Amino acid sequence: MESPPPLSGGAAADTGRIFDPSTYATGVPFDALARLRQDHPVVWVAEPPVLGWPGGPGFWLVLRHADVTQVMTDPRLFSSSLGGTQTRDPPTPDALRYVRRMMLNMDPPEHTRLRRLLTRAFTPRAVARLEDRIRDHARGIVSRVMGDAETGRCDFVKDLSAELPLVTLAEILGVPVEDRMLLFDWSNRVIGYQDPDYQASAAFDPNTGTPMARQASRLRPLPGPDGAMPDPRTREGMADLYAYAHLLAEEKRRRPGDDVMSILLAEIDDDGGRLSVEEFENMFWLFAVAGNETLRNGLPGAAIGLLDHPEIQDELRREPALLPAAIEELLRWWTPVMTFRRTATADCHLAGVAIRAGQKVVVSFTSANRDEAVFVDPDRLDIRRSPNPHLAFGFGPHFCLGAHLARVQMRALFGEILSRMGRLQPDGEPVWLQSNFQRGVKRLPVRWSPREVVPT
Ligand code: HEM
């Protein structure tokens, strides 16, 4: 397929920076996004070889809020299934077939069936139970970090952010808590494929897990002669995850628990069918990854907003009722998931640009969430912003299924931190994830002072 004529000068340099994963190891190129949003709101981005991967055909990057929502609400024209939802194409037709078995990479009506089954599995009782447990876990995490000391220091990522998404996911999936570090390693391997620090994550110690975990861990793929792990977006690359999901499904069918996945396995769909084991395995993959790294980046991202704005920390201590709106604004401001991909199913136009059938269309939530046509003074962190139609959780039929639980976790953790710790301050340089997909933080050293009585 023909690519459009090359861009000239500054715009070409801007798209090059936006594509290159190494750019994000030093920060998000907001200046480049703003310039393009102004002059080239739907812009062609070349895909040269990077990080040892071959080059790709290029893609259209969609930068404005209105155009992003249009793409996200029209799966007939902008498909999640045709080429999957990651910017980089799956390496082989087999790999594409494999990712298309996951709900994230389906279009209606297949997507609608699985989505309906899952939505029903989150029964009010299961959700209420999860919410209580999340608050308990958040309290426990902050207590462990604080100990008896009034002041202290820690790595916000490792000590305050990593555990909550893991224990929450373990509750949803019915994974025994001693196996939770498997979820940590799996999502690192999948999301960290752009960052050498995460690729071979091996925090789980099989000696501490269940027999199920030990059995699955024997299938953990080994690094190749070049030290790289096999592609995590193939079934072979995640053989240990699939083995574990299979054993877990058998166990849940034998002895259902009150977790969401047990409810899901017992459900009958509208045509009288059930979730197949393969569908369960893919659902397990999706949750294990989608519900983990996103929050492990969203929590420290929100913390950075509060570190940059100590006056907001004080305001939230004085008026805790502002916390839910503050979390929304922190999600907009940080935007943990920066992009998602669709593929055009037919020739069409978007913002006056001609798009050909089969071309990749990548939406930038990061840019849409800073669109000055929708958000006044978009770079400002304004916890009283209302309305706040941010797109951090996507939009349309694939809107994040975990959005409610992500919000509950963020509110629970920051509620605990703000009510029990004094002012949070930076305690060293943060280290950013190298990725053009997730806006990630690998290390965020912080310290806190004794809790003062905040004047009202
Ligand atoms: C701050 C945290 C999170 C962010 C920023 C986030 C972001 C997103 C986004 C942007 C999408 C849309 C993908 C698309 O349109 O193709 C999505 C989908 C999804 N998310 Fe999240 N997510 C978060 C947390 C979670 C959690 C905690 C869970 C699970 C408990 C979860 C489960 C899912 C699932 C299952 C989907 C696929 C939905 C579908 O295909 O219909 N996410 N998420």
Image (cartoon, helix red, strand yellow):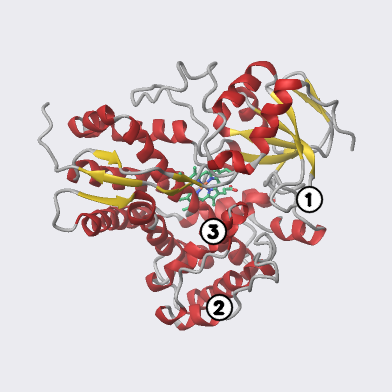
Q: Are marks 2 and 3 in contact (CB under 8 Å)?
A: no
The N terminus appears in which quarter of the rendering?
top right
Q: Residues within 10 Å of mark 1 (few under 14, many from 20)?
A: few
- Residue 188 visible to the viewer: yes
Find out if the beta carbon at label 1 lies less than 8 Å from the nearest ligand 1 atom: no
Q: State whether residue 91 is above or below residue 4.
A: below
Q: Is residue 337 left or right of residue 229?
A: left
Nearer the observer: mark 2 or 3; the answer is: 3
Image quadrant assignment for residue 329: top left
Residue displayed at 57% across by 46% down: 434
Q: Amino acid at mark 1?
A: Pro
Q: Amino acid at mark 2?
A: Ala
Image quadrant assignment for residue 419: top left
Q: Is residue 445 left or right of residue 431?
A: left
- The span from disc 2 to disc 3 (Cα, nearest Å) is 20 Å
Q: Which residue matches tag 1?
A: 54
- The span from disc 1 to disc 2 (Cα, nearest Å) is 32 Å
Q: Position of residue 415 (x, y in %)?
A: 25, 43
Q: Position of residue 121 (x, y in %)?
A: 48, 57
- The span from disc 1 to disc 3 (Cα, nearest Å) is 21 Å
Q: Which residue matches tag 2?
A: 216
Identify the secondary structure beneath mark 2.
helix
Disc nearer the start of the sequence (1/2): 1
Disc nearer the start of the sequence (2/3): 3
Residue 198 circle label: 3
